């Protein structure tokens, strides 16, 4: 069965935690009713888009890559070309940036607040991604 998806969709994949946009060459988009690609460890991420029964809008988006979780998506239908912006969380990024040691209690408190904010944001994004998995 051929895909019911519109042929003029622009795709964008963004890391929600870091605000980075993935290169189009590193992402493959597949529609749910199309044949699934063979798995390969070539650094490319595969995103599956589940379109509505009418085929005019996505109802779900998920990742086949174990290192990438979809936390949400935004569909912007346009008259000339629709945009599907997919938000994700990369589970590969374990890069630790060394920070200077706080010298004063105020600097220590500010560092704790910053780290708490970053951690709570990441937990919220992971919760969103897990909820997204429940719907597919």
Image: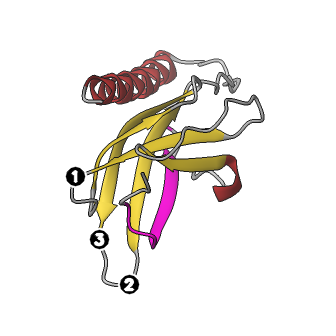
Query: Which type of secondary structure does the marked residue at label 1 adopt?
Result: loop
Q: Distance between the residues labelled 3 and 1?
A: 16 Å
Which sits in the foreground, 62 or 7? 7
Instruction: Give the label, 2 or 1, closer to the camera.
Output: 1
Q: Which residue is at a point 78% across and 35% down the rendered structure image?
A: 42
Query: Which type of secondary structure does the marked residue at label 2 adopt?
Result: loop
User: What span is colored magenta in the figure?
Assistant: 5-17
Q: Where is residue 24 in the image (x, y as percent from the top left)?
A: 64, 57
Vertical position of residue 117 compared to residue 53: above or below: above
Q: Where is residue 2 in the image (x, y as percent from the top left)?
A: 44, 56
Q: Distance between the residues labelled 3 and 2?
A: 9 Å
Which comes before the other along the chain, label 3 or label 1?
Answer: 1
Residue 70 lies in magenta, yes or no?
no
**Colour basis:** secondary structure
Q: Which mark is residue 80?
A: 2
Check whether the beta carbons of the residues at disc 2 and disc 1 lie within 8 A of each other: no
Q: Residue 53 carries which label?
A: 1
Is 7 on the left-hand or right-hand side of 71? right
Is 35 on the left-hand or right-hand side of 4? right
Vertical position of residue 10 compared to residue 93: above or below: below
Q: Distance between the residues labelled 2 and 1?
A: 22 Å
Which comes before the other along the chain, label 2 or label 1?
Answer: 1
Q: Which residue is at a point 30% across and 66% down the rendered structure image?
A: 76
Q: Where is residue 60 in the image (x, y as percent from the top left)?
A: 31, 42
The residue wearing badge 3 is 77
Query: Which type of secondary structure does the marked residue at label 3 adopt?
Result: loop
Q: Where is residue 44 in the image (x, y as percent from the top left)?
A: 69, 40
């Amino acid at each position: 069965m051929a895909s019911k998806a519109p042929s003029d969709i622009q795709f964008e994949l963004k890391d929600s935690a870091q605000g980075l946009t993935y290169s189009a060459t590193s992402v493959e988009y597949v529609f749910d009713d199309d044949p699934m690609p063979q798995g390969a460890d070539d650094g490319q991420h595969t995103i599956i888009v589940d379109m509505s029964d009418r085929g005019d809008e996505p109802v779900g988006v998920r990742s086949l890559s174990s290192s990438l979780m979809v936390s949400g998506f935004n569909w912007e239908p346009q008259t000339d070309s629709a945009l599907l912006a997919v938000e994700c969380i990369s589970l590969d990024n374990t890069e630790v940036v060394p920070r200077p040691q706080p010298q004063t209690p105020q600097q220590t408190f500010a560092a704790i607040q910053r780290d708490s904010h970053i951690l709570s944001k990441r937990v919220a994004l992971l919760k969103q991604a897990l909820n997204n998995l429940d719907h597919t």
